[in-house]
Image: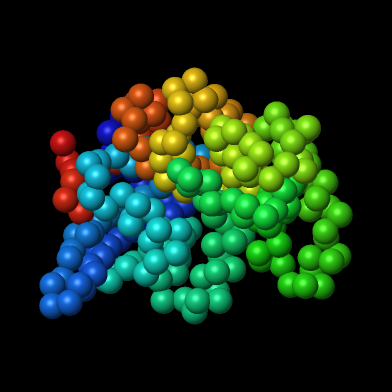
Amino acid sequence: MEANESLAREDALVEAVGVTKSYRIGRREIQVLRGVDVAVHPGEIVALVGQSGAGKSTLLHILGLLDPPTSGEVRYANKPVTRLSAARQAAMRHRHIGFVFQFYHLIPELTALQNVCLGSMMHESVLGWIARRREVRDRARELLDHMGLGDRLQNRPNQLSGGERQRVAIARALIAEPSLILADEPTGNLDSETAKEILDLIWSINEASKIAFLIVTHNERVAQMSDRIVRLRDGAISKE
């Protein structure tokens, strides 16, 4: 179904309120987002759709605390986080948000197992990582086995297919047990059969764990499978 304004904002897991984003190129200001209000609720899958250049990836990065808005506010569990220090934003991002990208963003020098462990290492102190490294590795192995990659633990990204790389990326996003996964065109670089497998995996994860997903997609089939569709047009939420 399309975005429903009657959904209670108090129940939102993450919310953008009046978010704008602009960039200056020389003397020219490019406005990408124009007062966006949008929320994702616990356990739901939301598709974010729109033409290229509509601002979808920009909004995803702002909601994921990777990029600050020019104005407006981002809230997690109804608490404003836009003005938190960079360190506190990073801690929140690493503990509560997972990311899946079209081109995987795996570290080429690391094995599949090491790439997944990296998702946990990023928010641990050195001593914390040393104390938990065996537990984290066991969890990473469990996730990769669940992804059907139990025999690919020591393979590097260039030894894996596109679908296998995306499964590693999904496992990395899951290792910290986030409440929200932000996925930017997660099937955009895959053939149709592999894309269907990845989508089936995402929906099974959502059903089993109730992790919320916000998925940027050009694929209308993906959008129609979702609980809710949010359409961006020219940097604003479309009411159509």
Quadrant the N terminus occupies: top left
Instruction: Name the spot of residue 24 as percent of width and height, x first.
Output: 21, 73
Instruction: Name the spot of residue 108 as percent of width and height, x first.
Output: 63, 52
Q: Nearer the viewer, residue 62 or 38?
A: 62
Q: Residue furthest top?
A: 193
Q: Nearer the viewer, residue 133 or 25?
A: 25
Q: Residue at x 28, y 71 (%)?
A: 70
Q: Residue at x 41, y 40 (%)?
A: 185
Horizontal placement of 16 versus 128: left or right? left
Horizontal placement of 46 versus 201: left or right? left
Instruction: Name the spot of residue 228 as percent of width and height, x first.
Output: 35, 35
Q: Nearer the viewer, residue 10 or 44?
A: 44
Q: Residue at x 64, y 48 (%)?
A: 172
Instruction: Name the spot of residue 58 as percent of width and height, x first.
Output: 33, 57
Res 124 quadrant in image: bottom right
**In the rendered image, is residue 94 in sight?**
yes
**Colour scheme of this structure image?**
rainbow
Vertical position of residue 8 compared to residue 207: above or below: below
Q: Residue at x 36, y 38 (%)?
A: 217
Horizontal placement of 179 versus 81: left or right? right
Quadrant the C terminus occupies: top left
Q: Residue furthest front?
A: 158
Vertical position of residue 111 compared to residue 46: above or below: below
